[in-house]
Image (cartoon, rainbow, N blue to C red):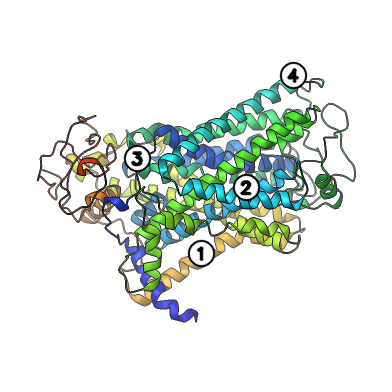
């Protein structure tokens, strides 16, 4: 019975909230083999995908071309503000599972567990949701169920095999895949410009489509303002993954090289989205009947509209599209409204009559979906690995020992248990073969639980930065010496973002914006009563489950009398030092840091890169007398730098409690 698991849940909650470490030696750590461009392309793969094309088409259909551009610009600004704080903290502490660790050390222990579960679920279910969308893309060529079934079986196998390989292999695949994605986006943008100016087989369109500006479809929103806030709530989902760079930080060869990608990734993704959307809205009328429909709330085929050139829009149709549009059904899910197997670029291209080019682009979108699903499994597995690292392998609790397995890695540094554990939702795409009112809706709700929860995960990151900033400011006069001087605002500026002078106001705004967008703006879609129960589940079930989990954890903490309330008090200097030191120890699990006694790198073969930054040189060596390692010449793998480690120390020296040598 469930009550028999109560002691195990208590034990697991206690270890996770207290940050108990397995203290594993070097061979059980993730490998640090990712280069800066590989990390950059991993984030590109996580964000730029088929979901963007579906979401942008959905917004265009009920809010008009101007609203699409404004919605993606607004969300891009919020995402940039979130990453301003997160990127600073991850530059200082490139730890495993940073999204969880920052909340744990600066906000609340139990909230960190909720963040961990929500973040893992988001990417584990996202892998399945993207694969389900791939089945919709396949229907562009064939409506046979066997075609979709082949995708639903083949794609997971490919993704699993890639993720079970070393991070070097994964990084190479993502590097190539990211370049391909960016090339596809560039080709699409220039194609849209050429079509708009009349360079294709059809007359020039110029501003005939985009001049419609801000609109509102009465079936979805009664006013343009309502349509705009609903559009912003939908535009936020293609940005999920922008924070993925934090999950790769621990596996970076040189964490100093993270600086540029961390600062620029949000800007680059936002510009990519805006240019792509601009190209599409220049060529596709917002009343085009082939656009995805928000919860199928209207029938675009009762009074077919004309396209921007004044001719009837008649793209090539497969049998599945004819049937879906005639019966107003969704061939598949992955968005709230996939009403046909046509995405925005396909609609724009088919208006020109270039069927073979449309086939090519649809194939590119299919590859894009595969790449996004591959990255989703990677991020989910690293989140689950971090969870496993917080559980003791020798715990008397069977549940705790089971969770600890996810923190293991093989000889190549791959967390295979975590990969398999994150593969648990691979069966979800098969639900699309079920009835419209049954299995498919279950699939949609499962997907939306992850989507809304992930955006809410952004808010605690901003909150963590606010409290991190405040705590350091409270003890600014103590931030001196080689060990803690790096946290002084003047020295910390090298890790800070472009808007550092506006912090923490930027973090406050981004935190509130994330909450309002998910819990407030999304509710605008419920103004129209159609599918209101499904909308409510999609929007509020995920946040509701997170809140329930938070309450359960607080109850377990109260019942077991562990470590106070779990809330991180911004206490005195000694308490701050304890948190700073513990985060630093997570950067170097190979060093097995205990309290203030730490083994320190002594081989300065690479030279000191910057004395002001107090950063260690590449490939340090250290005393490995009680630490196993599989690195060459007995040296454990250590990242190229960290601000709290000095390369000048001699063998046997240790940092004193006040930061002196």
SS state under label 1: helix
Q: Position of residue 623 (x, y in %)?
A: 15, 47
| N-term-proximal mark, 3 vs 1 | 3
Separation of marks 2 and 4 at Cα, in angstroms: 32 Å
Q: Which mark is residue 547?
A: 1
The reply to whether discs 3 and 1 touch (Cβ–Cβ < 8 Å) is no
Q: What residue do we see at 88% from left, 29% from top?
A: 311
Mark 3 → mark 1, Cα distance in angstroms: 30 Å
| Mark 2 closeness class: few <14, some 14–19, many ≥20 residues within 10 Å | many
SS at circle 3:
helix
Q: Relative to the observer, which residue lies in front, 28 or 598?
A: 28
In the image, residue 152 above or below residue 20: above
Q: CA distance from mark 3 to mark 2?
A: 30 Å
- Identify the residue at horizontal 38%, vertical 35% (top origin): 258
Foreground: disc 2 or disc 4 = 4
Q: Secondary structure at mark 2?
A: helix
Left or right side of 660 for 273? right
Question: Which tag is nearer the camera, tag 3 or tag 1?
Answer: 3
Q: Residue at x 43, y 69 (%)?
A: 553
State how far apart marks 2 and 1 are (Cα). Answer: 20 Å
Judged from the image, the secondary structure of the residue bearing numbered disc 4 is loop
First in sequence: mark 2 vs mark 1: 2
Q: Which mark is residue 197?
A: 4
For mark 2, what is the residue? 233
| Residue 329 position (above or below residue 312) | below
């Amino acid at each position: 019975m469930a009550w028999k698991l109560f002691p195990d849940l208590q034990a697991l909650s206690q270890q996770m909230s207290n940050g108990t470490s397995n203290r594993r030696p070097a061979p059980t750590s993730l490998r640090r083999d990712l280069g800066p461009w590989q990390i950059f392309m991993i984030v590109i793969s996580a964000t730029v995908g088929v979901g963007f094309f579906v979401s942008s088409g959905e917004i265009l259909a009920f809010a008009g071309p101007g609203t699409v551009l404004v919605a993606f610009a607004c969300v891009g600004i919020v995402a940039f503000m979130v990453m301003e704080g997160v990127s600073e903290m991850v530059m200082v502490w490139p730890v495993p599972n940073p999204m969880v660790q920052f909340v744990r050390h600066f906000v609340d222990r139990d909230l960190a567990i909720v963040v961990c579960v929500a973040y893992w679920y988001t990417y584990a279910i996202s892998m399945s949701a993207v694969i389900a969308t791939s089945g919709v893309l396949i229907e562009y060529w064939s409506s046979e169920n066997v075609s979709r079934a082949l995708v639903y079986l083949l794609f997971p196998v490919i993704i699993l095999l890639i993720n079970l390989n070393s991070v070097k292999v994964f990084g190479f695949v993502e590097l190539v895949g990211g370049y391909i994605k960016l090339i596809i986006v560039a080709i699409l943008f220039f194609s849209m410009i050429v079509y708009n100016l009349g360079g294709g087989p059809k007359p020039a369109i110029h501003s005939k489509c985009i001049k419609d500006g801000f609109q509102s479809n009465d079936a979805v929103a009664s006013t343009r303002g309502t349509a705009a806030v609903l559009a912003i709530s939908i535009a936020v989902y293609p940005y999920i993954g922008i924070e993925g760079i934090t999950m790769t930080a621990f596996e970076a060869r040189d964490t100093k090289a993270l600086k540029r990608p961390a600062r620029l990734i949000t800007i680059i993704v936002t510009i990519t989205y805006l240019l792509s959307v601009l190209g599409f809205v220049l060529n596709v009328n917002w009343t085009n009947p082939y656009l995805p429909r928000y919860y199928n709330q209207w029938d675009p085929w009762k009074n077919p509209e004309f396209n921007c050139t004044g001719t009837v829009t008649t793209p090539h149709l497969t049998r599945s599209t004819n049937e879906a549009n005639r019966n107003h059904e969704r061939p598949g899910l992955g968005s709230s409204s996939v009403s046909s197997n046509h995405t925005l670029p396909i609609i724009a291209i088919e208006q020109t009559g270039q069927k073979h080019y449309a086939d090519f682009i649809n194939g590119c979108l299919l590859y894009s979906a595969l790449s996004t699903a591959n990255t989703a499994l990677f991020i989910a597995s690293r989140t689950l690995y971090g969870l496993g690292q917080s559980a003791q392998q020798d715990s008397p609790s069977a549940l705790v020992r089971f969770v600890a397995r996810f923190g293991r890695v093989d000889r190549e540094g791959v967390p295979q248990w975590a990969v398999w554990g994150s593969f648990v939702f691979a069966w979800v795409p098969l639900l699309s073969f079920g009835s419209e009112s049954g299995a498919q809706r279950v699939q949609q709700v499962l997907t939306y639980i992850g989507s809304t929860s992930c955006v809410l995960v952004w808010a605690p990151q901003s909150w963590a930065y606010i409290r991190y900033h405040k705590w350091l400011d409270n003890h600014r006069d103590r931030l001196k010496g080689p060990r803690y001087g790096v946290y002084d605002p003047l020295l910390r500026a090298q890790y800070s973002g472009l808007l550092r002078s506006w912090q923490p106001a930027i973090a406050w705004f981004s935190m509130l914006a994330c909450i309002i967008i998910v819990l407030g703006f999304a509710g605008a879609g419920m103004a129209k009563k159609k599918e209101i129960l499904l909308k409510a589940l999609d929007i509020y079930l995920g946040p509701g489950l997170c809140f329930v989990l938070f309450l359960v954890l607080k109850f377990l903490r109260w019942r077991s009398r562990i470590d106070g309330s779990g809330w991180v008090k911004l206490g005195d200097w000694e308490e701050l030092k304890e948190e700073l030191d513990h985060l630093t120890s997570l950067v170097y699990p190979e060093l097995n840091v205990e309290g203030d006694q730490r083994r320190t790198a002594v081989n300065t073969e690479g030279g000191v890169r910057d004395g002001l930054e107090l950063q260690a040189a590449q490939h340090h060596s250290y005393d490995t007398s009680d630490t196993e390692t599989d690195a060459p010449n007995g040296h454990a793998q250590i990242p190229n730098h960290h601000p709290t480690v000095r390369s000048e120390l001699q063998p046997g020296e240790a940092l004193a409690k006040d930061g002196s040598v």
